[in-house]
Amino acid sequence: MASVAEFKKSFLAEIDKIESREELEKLRVKYLGREKGLVTAVLRSLGGMPIEKRKEIGPQAQGLKQEIEKLLSNRKEILETKETMASVDLTAPGRKPARGHLHPLTLVEDEIRRIFMAMNFSVVEGPEVESDYYNFDALNILPDHPARDAWDTIWLRQNQIKNQKSKIKNGGRLLLRTHTSPVQIRYMEEHKPPFQIIVPGRVFRYEATDASHEVNFYQFEGLMVGKNVTFANFKFVIEEFFKRFFSAKGGSASGGKRPQIEFRYRPSYFPFTEPSVEVDIKLGGKWLEVMGAGMVNPRVFEYAHYNPRDFQGFAFGMGVDRLAMIKYKIPDIRMFYSGDLRFIKQF
């Protein structure tokens, strides 16, 4: 008992004076070393003691061993911390923490949303797995319509998506939507005019990838329906959008410096609009095709259960990727989907 108590007292006195890990190791060997450790010797001597003495000294020696191990471990952590701090130059400037960056497509879509919401448009979203009724039929693209070939559709195997069958209308087939226009039909089925919406989202095409084409990309479409909506309303909305989008301050605030943009409307054809136009803008001395649009075809209103004599409206659609490439001067659409952080960190 006297020996164990004396060992504890001497150990506590010695450990407070330790200033290096080398000294700490010597102290450990002195008390807990296998060959000549003081506490180890006490534990080894228990076998030759009377049983009563062994019951008395054994727990004391074992408790001291555990306490010494804990104190040695704590002291080691303190010494390691001191050594680490001693090697740190506190006068050196700190490292700037890495910050995340929004993807350029996210930045552009957010800006599009802000601009149109400022013009009182609502943002609507819909499913990416769609039926051919909404993707084609209700948009006046019937099964034998040659325009279907232009959409390079990705059809889905019906037996792999049985849980989706309840969403198929009129016995149609499922597909990955080729444009966001189906959401316009879904919205018109559940809402009555007047309204004005935009529909951003991802779309899919089965086509070869190159600098300007991808298997999946992002679009946004707009729809405005009312009793007295005209092509003049469409021109104002679109021209205002592009002036804000390409303004010096990014667009959503009208105080940004407006760029000089010229607009050109060329006759075109889309099954779901009549008349239809392609919209070009002249930015930086070069004409760029940016949008397809037109007045909503009366047949589309009939599919949505509207009376075409009561309402009229315009619809438009454009690629978010296309706008991002123009805004940030990106030469290849595949860069958006490369996953290269060096590309993302530029924005």
Image (cartoon, helix red, strand yellow):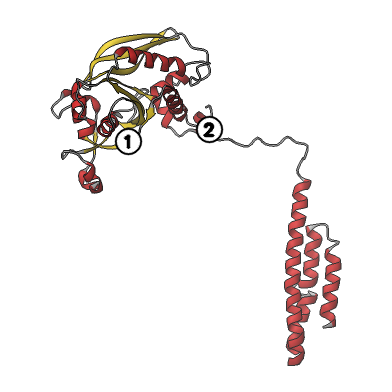
Q: Quadrant of residue 228?
A: top left
Q: Quadrant of residue 43?
A: bottom right
User: How many neighbours does mark 2 have within 10 angstroms: few (below 14), some (14-19), or many (20 or more)?
Assistant: few
Q: Quadrant of residue 215?
A: top left
User: Where residue 316 sits: x, y (%)?
Assistant: 31, 21
The residue under label 2 is which amino acid type? His
Q: Is residue 217 left or right of residue 54?
A: left
Foreground residue, 51 or 48? 51
The residue under label 1 is which amino acid type? Gly
Query: Which of disc 1 and disc 2 is earlier in sequence?
Result: 2
User: Where residue 243 sits: x, y (%)?
Assistant: 44, 14
Q: Is residue 44 left or right of residue 120?
A: right
Q: State the CA–CA distance, disc 2 to disc 1.
A: 27 Å
Foreground residue, 307 or 43? 307
* Residue hosting label 1: 126
Q: Is residue 338 left or right of residue 79?
A: left
The residue under the point 86% across, 61% down is 17
Evaluate whether residue 34 shows in this view: no
Q: Is residue 34 left or right of residue 337?
A: right
* Residue hosting label 2: 101
User: Where residue 10 sits: x, y (%)?
Assistant: 86, 71
The residue under the point 53% across, 32% down is 101
- Callout 2 secondary element: loop
User: Where residue 135 sits: x, y (%)?
Assistant: 24, 31
Question: Quick one: quadrant of the N terminus?
Answer: bottom right
- Callout 1 secondary element: loop
